[in-house]
Amino acid sequence: MKTTDISRRRFLQEMAGAVSLVSAGVAASPWIGLSGGAEIRTGPKPRQIKPGAAQKVFPRWRGFNLTHFFTKGSDGKPFEDEFRWMQDWGFDFIRLPMSYETWVEEGDWYTIKESTLEKIDRIVEWAQKYGIHASLNFHRGPGYCVNPPAEKLSLWKDDEALRAFHWHWTMFAKRYKGISSKYVSFDLLNEPQQPDESRMSRQDYVRVMTSTTKAIRQIDPSRLVIVDGLSWGRDPVAELVDLGVGQSNRGYDPMPISHYQASWVNGDRWPMPVWPDSEGKTHKWDRKRLQEHYQPWIDLAKKGVGVHCGECGCYNKTPHKVFLAWFRDVLDILTENNIGYALWNFTGSFGILDSQRADVEYEEFHGHKLDRELLKLLQEY
């Protein structure tokens, strides 16, 4: 390890030590230190939560997914202004979906490119500087990704893939040990598929998430761990309640609204969306059905589990008015239950910047096109 690497690690840990609320030896109480939210918060005040809301563990984190390390071909170029703008607008959360391929030499799970990890270090630094929680997520981990191409081995069936998965997460556990879970969490794996016996059973998923959490906590007992719900984030995992991990859901249903015309889900087969569809002409969803959809997550939160919506939003081909009307109902249900959210994405086809929607009057913003109407809706919630 180079001297500069040691200096950077020391800086991260010393900066964390000044603000850390997680005391030593809190493995039995992984939620300690989270209730205060971010210390630095500006921008409009969001809606206040009524007493008795279901979710009592996490702050109602509100923010965005940053996609700089999302795939092997992502730009890998985070910049500090993103954090400054989020703070100015009143947000306090980023989720960082990452592919392990961005920090390994091609074809070798164990040869690390330190230059990529140093860029992720900077994100962790900026998160602390601006009072923003950074949730690091494996969008592609050794052995599984929801997107093609498929991994060469299965995380659920092959011991070699599971060992590599553990190895990569324990690498991050060592790297960020000493930084409060108030500022950094580990979201283990993006959107596990619907369980089946041939590819991934429920038991497979519970086993892998449990063993990975234990491997992380052997190194950093107080690290906050989050797991995604099954069936691509739709279904909570009751078997993991006693593990002391948070759980992450999605704000995409009904898909014919959120992914209308999206080629990767064959969205061109869906008719022009409306909201609500109380007459059942297209997707047959309305506010009542949305409430029913989220009720299992509300019930999970009532059991004392931290719940967060790790991804939500709408592709740019859905009419903007339909998107905003549907999304207001999604955010309203989440907010009533004190469940925070992270929009997919900050910049891009689902985002508030440079989404390239055809029916939005954009505002010029530091060289970007800002969807002010969407921003105002997010700030309200």
Image: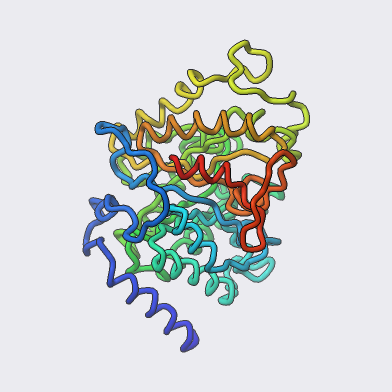
x and y percentages locating residue 130 in the rendered image: 41, 64
Q: Viewed as shown, does residue 294 lie left or right of 326?
A: left
User: Quick check: 366 above or below 114?
Assistant: above
**Quarter residue 239 falls in:** top left
Q: Viewed as shown, does residue 98 lie left or right of 293?
A: right
Outermost residue toward the bottom?
A: 3
Q: Nearer the viewer, residue 123 or 372?
A: 372
User: Quick check: 35 above or below 7?
Assistant: above
Q: Nearer the viewer, residue 349 or 230?
A: 349
User: Residue shown at 68%/18% (left/top)?
Assistant: 282
x and y percentages locating residue 253 in the rendered image: 57, 30
From this viewpoint, is residue 217 visible? no
Q: Viewed as shown, does residue 353 lie left or right of 228?
A: right
Q: Nearer the viewer, residue 162 or 290?
A: 290
x and y percentages locating residue 350 in the rendered image: 63, 45
From this viewpoint, is residue 252 visible? yes
User: Residue shown at 28%/38% (left/top)?
Assistant: 304
x and y percentages locating residue 149 in the rendered image: 71, 50
User: Residue shown at 63%/65% (left/top)?
Assistant: 102
User: Residue shown at 68%/25% (left/top)?
Assistant: 273
**Quarter residue 254 falls in:** top right
For the C terminus, the image quarter is top left
